[in-house]
Image: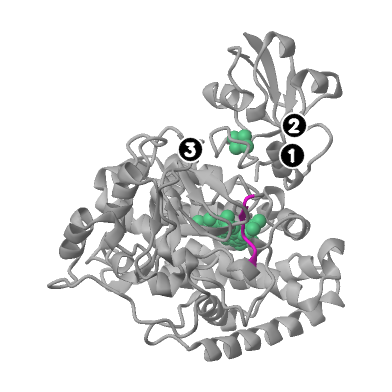
Amino acid sequence: MAKIKYIEFDRTEHVVEVANGENLMEGALGNNVPGIDGDCGGNAACATCHCYVGDDWLAATGPRSDSEEAMLELADGMTANSRLACQIIASDAIDGIELRLPETQH
Amino acid sequence: MATQPEISSTEEPPRGRTRPNMVWPFPPRERPDLPDHEPATLAEYLRTAPLDAVDIADPLWWENDVEGVFLKRLRDEAPVHFNEVNAARHRGFWSVTRWEDIMAVDTNHQAYSSEASLGGITLFDMDPDFIMPMFIAMDPPKHDVQRKAVNPIVSGPNLAGFETLIRERTAEVLDGLPRGEVFDWVDRVSIELTSRMLATLFDWPQEQRRKLTYWSDISTSDPELPGNPSKEERQTILMGMLQEFMALWNERVNAEPKTDLVSMLAHNPATRNMPPMEFMGNLVLLIVGGNDTTRNSISGGVYFLNKNPTEYDKLRANPALVESMVSETIRYQTPLAHMRRTALEDTILGGKHIRKGDKVVMWYISGNRDERSIEDPDAFIIDRKRPRQHMSFGFGIHRCVGNRLAELQLKILWEEILKRFDRIELIEEPERVPSAFVKGYKKMMVRIPA
Ligand code: HEM
Ligand code: FES
């Protein structure tokens, strides 16, 4: 179980518990956290689960895959901290992580 | 489920794949000998014919809305299937019909190309004598550079600036509709609204708005169908369009930057210095991309609500459902029934050996009805749990860049409709577009009770 803090663009915070093994896009949708759409169901194929991971947590979330990289490249407002939430899997290692969400998904 | 490592060595390479390139004009289309072309007769044929005897690209099925019968059989019995019939007209192609397999193709742009010179993105190859460079029909890295330039223009925050204007234009059209009188929803609303919208987004003279619709229709029209302009006529018309846009661009590139899409493209450092043909290609792509797709979603909504009165009741009772109703409409309609790719290498898909050069057709309209991935997919349910999880916008690097714009237009339209009309009644079955690519309506007679 990992405690995840989703921070909407307007700074509204949502802290939810996500079971180990579940991805953080599902974690948002399953807990009615707004700001993540997850249109492709978690295949790194739509980029509507774009989020920003703070520098301190980047290493713990692991590297981006090639397909994640390709989708993020085309996303609005992509930065070095950008990740696709569906490609981050909840585990003890990321307990307490914060994800900032963009103004809109595209 | 998507791929299995076995290549069956006994499998004959389908004949169509060894044939040389198509020569215009194509030979006549082979069709089954049927007593009539009533939808019931056609559906019965598709239910029982051998899978290898059917050409699913034949517009006949689509014009009569019966293609789903056959696509379901493909999903269940032959999810990756070579369509050999009429190969002399389309070279033969692989039909990919399950959600998972379509996803596998769509997300593998390394193996499956969109490149125009290989034929592009539709089942029937692009006219090799008239290729407009558009990023929808390019592979990386060029695709990515051009898409990135257009992306911010149709992003959420930027679109918010258009919202008031879109709402005003929508209200004008709806307020002008007759009450207690039968009229064609396609012409009076779907086309009218999309053409006004295009004119608004491009800051194109409103009184000439139907020109945009006309050009868009021509660029997707099949030169072989009776009544459509020939290949040569089509080229002339599209060149005329390019000239008019060129003039507009020249005017705006030297003027103060404004918020219309042409100005934005003309002033954006990433697009400003594009070669003229490429710039045009992208402009045309925005026009074509947003035209009949949105138009047919507008018509589709009216049709589906009429066929599902309890859903219409739900919507009337709770207008907050508009957003999910819009997504469900786009799924259920699937305005672009397929996208096509060309294999760049030998691969295995669903246990089939796809050879380099093969055409691979992703039937989104079938993936959207695949019960392996979507619960109760044949039902139109405006408050389903995950209405956004559909394939109508494609997936991967070519996923529709205009999706937010389309959703915004449809959302505003339905909000304004619900404010005004209690009901829009379908009077008779609509006339449909005879095309395996654009899934849509030519005419839909309705009445708004007085
Ligand atoms: C309900 C409405 C719409 C549907 C169903 C739709 C569908 C699609 C699909 C399936 C693709 C993927 C193409 C591929 O994978 O080869 C696509 C791409 C595209 N669409 Fe849309 N579209 C819609 C509205 C719009 C609008 C309003 C615009 C205009 C702003 C637009 C512009 C584009 C562009 C530019 C691409 C190319 C993206 C790329 O290649 O990277 N579309 N659309
Ligand atoms: S849900 Fe589509 S990329 Fe994450």
Query: How far across and how far down the image is residue B300, in percent?
Result: 37, 58
Q: Which residue is nearer to you in this view: A53 or B131?
A: B131
Three-letter residue code for mark 2: Arg
Residue B391 visible in this rendered orientation of the protein: no
Mark 3 vs ligand 1: CB below 8 Å: no
Q: Where's ligand 2: which quadrant?
A: top right
Q: Alpha carbon of mark 2 to alpha carbon of mark 1: how far?
A: 6 Å
Q: Are marks 3 and 2 on the same chain?
A: no
Q: Chain of mark 2?
A: A
Relative to residue B298, is residue B275 depicted above or below? below
Circle 3: is it few (<14), some (14-19), or many (20+) Cα within 10 Å?
few
Three-letter residue code for mark 1: Glu
Nearer the observer, disc 3 or disc 1?
A: 3
Residue at 63%, 23% in the rendered image: A24
Circle 1: is it few (<14), some (14-19), or many (20+) Cα within 10 Å?
some
Q: Which residue is mark 2?
A: A64
Q: Are marks 2 and 1 in contact (CB under 8 Å)?
A: yes
Q: Chain of mark 1?
A: A
Relative to residue B167, is residue A78 depicted above or below? above
Q: Alpha carbon of mark 3 to alpha carbon of mark 1: how far?
A: 30 Å
Residue at 61%, 84% in the rendered image: B238
Q: Which residue is nearer to you in this view: A76 or B364?
A: B364
Q: Which residues are magenta?
A: B111-116
| Residue B303 is inside the magenta segment | no
Query: Horizontal placement of B66 versus B269: left or right?
Result: left
Relative to residue A59, is residue B414 depicted above or below? below
Q: Chain of mark 3?
A: B
Q: Which residue is mark 3?
A: B6
Query: How far across and how far down the image is residue B179, in percent?
Result: 30, 68
Dot 2 or dot 1, earlier in sequence: 2
